[in-house]
Amino acid sequence: MKRFLLAAAFFAVLVLLWEAAYRTKFWSPVLLPSPRQVVTYLEGVAADGTLFKATVITMRRLLVGYLIGLVMGLPLGLLTARWKLFHDTIGTLALGLQTLPSVCWVPLALLWFGQTEAAMLFVVVMGTLWSVVIATETGVRNVPPIYRRAALTMGSKRLHMWFKVILPAALPFIVSGMKQGWAFAWRSLMAAEIFVTILSGFGLGQLLHYGRELSAMEQVIGIMIVIIVIGLLADKIFFSPVERFLHRRWGTSQA
Amino acid sequence: MRRAVRRSSATEELEVIPPSKLAIDNVSKNFQSASGPVLALDRVSLNVAEGEFVCLVGASGCGKTTLLNIIAGLEKPDSGRVLADGKPVTGPGRERLVMFQEPALFPWLDVFGNVLFGLKLKPNLTNKDRCDVAKYYLELVGLSRFEHANIHELSGGMKQRVSLARALAPNPRVLLMDEPFAALDALTREQLYGDIQEIWKTRRKTIVFVTHNVREAACLGDRVLLFSPHPGRVQEEFTVELPRPRDINSVDLATHATRITKALKSLGQAEAIAAK
């Protein structure tokens, strides 16, 4: 409770500083709206359903792309961990492509797919896939050989070995890879939504983009806050419980 | 007609089954090291009787762990073979379970899950039977209260007890132990010496126990085999005829241990001279 109050106080101070900066009129109000203006904007888009619709559209794109990235990335990671051939080929490719900032996929996606959902999906998948591949491979390679040997003597082999020993043993790595993949997917999707203007649905990124076009700073800041809050919530709802479980089981220190 | 497969019950599963006899026949094994091939085992032959407790003693690097791995089927010999009850060992199997030096317990499972792991790989058992069997062995090693503990919450001694329960649970005929108590403190070790003798008596296993602790070997083994390094060979054999349960601190035991230590030392000296 004390921690919660402290954190709340911290954010209250941030908002106060912002309000104070607005009141000095040092910056033009067009560039720096007041917290109240931003809240009013958010209330407006929340009331007319724009915000909800945009969030749903964005989350749908994110989840679909992320899941495709996971479903492709996990097996690819296992393959690269298991066979040298895959490690030298797909592993190297993954390492290279992972260093590529995902926004760099946008021009290519636009030329290949045009202003379509497919273009955005492609960018999100590319953002997720490679870090999941690499995390899975690292995880599997870091499984202490003794677990394998112990399981072998107890009669575990092939699929049983993979699903009951190697994957669970690699879980801490895989989860942190999934988390990283999620962060990359989120970033790539925002990049894609800002650049790809399509009529199949306005996401948060597009709202942000039009905030800029209209020089509506309260919209830009308001949507940025929404994006931040969604990122935080995803972390608290999806990843924190899993990480807590891992910390408890493995006895690793809890951050 | 799918019911035709006979399910064995937990009571049957807990029956004391006859231990195996092992025959190690002319086993050699080379390793590639940076400075060329090293002969880890040189035509090692030995027999272990049903239900015998045999200790392999020697300096580190003398190939005793390699031999244990070969008996387990985790490594293949370059030549020679291992027979368990007359049948050649071709790979690892739950007839011969290993207890490793570092506890190889799975951190993603709790204590109970670890003991259950090998049982789940045994066909023809109901899940209830498996749970009953796992409970029995946790009781046997005195850890019933810690069923749902996470592995990292256990002390070193408790971890090795869980390892022991996990190795015993699938009811193997042979137990292979690779310096299982080396990392434990003296007090915990002494307790475990008592426990392992008791369990060996009630569960009737053939045990091959690797250690570099001569006293430990004299305390536990019916026979103590002295390994010489470079190349690994069985140098000498000692029979320990003391009543059980044996106390590691008893004078009789010390006498035996001294005899073995002497032999071990002269071996070391011989090697030092040979090296010169």
Image (tube, coloured by chain):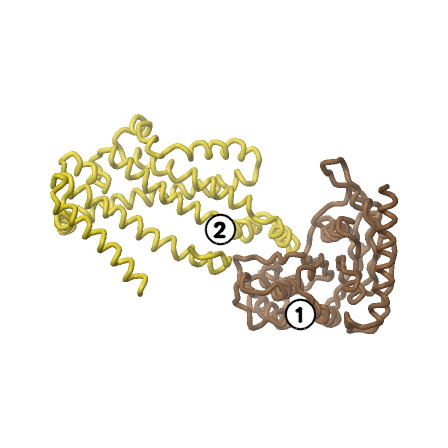
Chain colours: A yellow, B brown
Residue A187 appears in which quarter of the rendering?
A: top left
Q: Position of residue A209 (x, y in %)?
A: 20, 36
Q: Which residue sits furthest top?
A: A111
Image quarter of the N terminus of chain B: bottom right
- For label 1, the SS is loop
In front: A225, or A97?
A: A225
Visible residue check, residue B153: yes
Instruction: Identify the residue position indicated by label 1 in the image.
Output: B14
Q: Position of residue A232 (x, y in %)?
A: 31, 51
* Chain of the residue where label 2 is placed in the rendered structure: A
- At label 2, the amino acid type is Leu
Above or below — where is A242 with respect to B146?
above
Q: CA distance from mark 1 to mark 2?
A: 34 Å
Q: Position of residue A191 (x, y in %)?
A: 29, 36
In front: A173, or B75?
A: A173
* Chain of the residue where label 1 is placed in the rendered structure: B
Image quarter of the C terminus of chain B: top right
Visible residue check, residue B16: no
Instruction: Identify the residue position indicated by label 2 in the image.
Output: A171
Residue B208 appears in which quarter of the rendering?
A: bottom right
Instruction: Please tell me how crowded label 2 is: few (under 14), some (14-19), or many (20+) other residues with Cα within 10 Å.
Output: some
Residue drawn 51% across the image and 31% down it:
A89
* Disc number for residue B99: none
- At label 1, the amino acid type is Leu
- For label 2, the SS is helix
What number of labels is visible? Answer: 2
